[in-house]
Amino acid sequence: MAEELKKEEEKSLNFLEEIVEEDLASGKYKSIRTRFPPEPNGYLHIGHSKSIILNFSLAQKYGGSTNLRFDDTNPVTEDTEYVESIKADIRWLGFEWANELYASDYFEQLYLFAEDLIRKGLAYVDDSTPEEIARLKGTPTEPGKDSPYRSRPVEENLQLFREMRAGKYKDGEKVLRAKVDMSAPNMQLRDPLMYRIRHVHHHRTGDAWCIYPMYDFAHGQSDSIENITHSICTLEFVSHRPLYDWFIEKLDIFPSHQYEFARLNLNYTVMSKRKLLQLVNEGHVTGWDDPRMPTLSGLRRRGYTPESIRMFAEKIGVQKRDNLIDVSLLEFCVREHLNKIANRRMVVFDPLKIVLTNYEQDEEWLASENNPEDADSGTRNLPFSRELYIEQEDFMENPPKKFFRLSPGQKVRLKSAYIIQCDEVVKDASGKITELRCSYVPESKSGGSQSNMKVQATIHWVSIPHAITAEVRLYDRLFGVEDPANEERDFKEYINPDSLQVLPGAFAEPALREAKFDEHYQFLRKGYFYLDRDNSEDRLIFNRTTTLRDTWVKEQKKGS
């Protein structure tokens, strides 16, 4: 029964897949075309990944194609740096677009569309100030009032619009508006702006234009020019859809159709580009790719994999209602993937020295598995010697009843090595423990006659003469509250002071000297880690991607 339910679940379609299948079955379209239309004014974040995966996967599943179209209609905030980062993020997620396009490719065509609407008496030039336009627009419960310029003759509107293009007027002096319905219940239809004057250099068109189309005008018409069959937006654009349809109908162009789904909202972070920019500009984080940021470049630097993000998108599904997704689900997805692919390594964060008093060799090399989840990952050789480091927390001089790690007279197994027993505790003048004198059981390593000796715990370790030092950056959630954007005080006041802890002198097994940027590691009993881009030949730096299990819930309960 469980297997049948699982198969049924796998077969079930989301509402967009149902729409596409119906459109193809009815012959409405022979093939589908979607688009991902980012504004090049910031770095993509985890919320955008849902839209990317949805648009590209939908087209892939049904043999269609996806365009990447940059909505570069606001030159004030745009930059080629953002264009390149967006392209890199999409490719990192595993997708390739059919065409790389820009709304600016269509500036001439959009201008001609605007003139067409003017000729049809469906657009006019308005000299009102932004304040006057807002006042005349009315409220959701009161109808708007016509602008005194709404009845301008067609020829005058054409001349003024051409003069706007020619640069005759200053910024804000005039706008072009659609003539729809000032008493419409939907505020979006109350003569929305189509063009505004901006004497600003554009990153692609230079100074060729000083008027720029508004998003609502550029969006649907760009979709139509590209023959986009399914234009997928987030829910805040539901009220914009009647205007989207109105422009297409009045221009009598290819009828692209807009569909809306719930955006991805994640707890313990913020998604607003404006807020993310504040965090960067005010120095709360080191940059857009700070590993605590929800940006794709930040997640990538932290060690998240594209597979884990695609798994996350699949698990949350496609909804029609906004909700707040628990970041624990994202962390679960990355743990699931990293558990399968990450090579195991031993690193001691807070060292306590051990001397094996009965170990007489200089050193020996022991085989240890790279990844128990991957039969093909092989083994590596670990150096073992008389002097070792273990974690301070793995020893207690006066342990409670259920402490099974090392304590005086108690035995533990050293991972991939021998069983040892603590015989003596060495302290300095202040009473601080500086060293443990231990003995090892010679025949207790794997395959030895005493390897089956029962011990309650296995701990990790490194050989002191062979250990290399590494900086370890322990990243945690950037905010200490679930929904920082909706708290009473400024969202930045809720930044988690423990979101980054730096351990400058951890001791690692020498195999990590060969660490590579495309490899992921599980530091045994510590978490999953990834080499940071600040890394250099003489300074190894690792970022914690996530802990081995969800410790946040436990900490929250402890604090409540």
Image (tube, grey):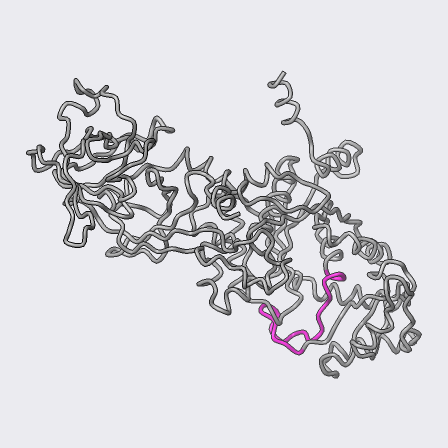
- Asked if 458 appears above or below 553 in the picture, the reply is above
Outermost residue on the top side: it is 1
Front-lying residue, 295 or 331? 331
Q: Quadrant of residue 225?
A: bottom right
Number of numbered discs: 0
In-image side of 154 versus 285 (left or right): right
Query: Does residue 200 belong to the magenta stretch?
Result: yes
Quadrant of residue 489 within the rendered picture? bottom right
147 with respect to 355 (left or right): right
Magenta span dominant secondary structure = loop
Instruction: Where is residue 329? Give x, y as percent.
Output: 54, 40
Q: Is residue 460 magenta?
A: no
Q: Which quadrant of the figure contains the N terminus? A: top right
- Closer to the camera in the image, 450 or 393: 393
Instruction: Find residue 5 and report its horizontal and vertical position in percent.
Output: 64, 21
Q: Position of residue 174 (x, y in %)?
A: 79, 78
Q: Nearer the viewer, residue 497 or 34?
A: 497
Residue 337 at what x, y percent from top left?
A: 46, 36
Q: Is residue 539 above or below residue 340?
A: below
Which region is colored magenta?
199-218
Instruction: State the residue at coordinates (24%, 30%).
Output: 412
List the single residue furthest toward the left: 360
- In the displayed structure, would residue 152 be above or below residue 377? below
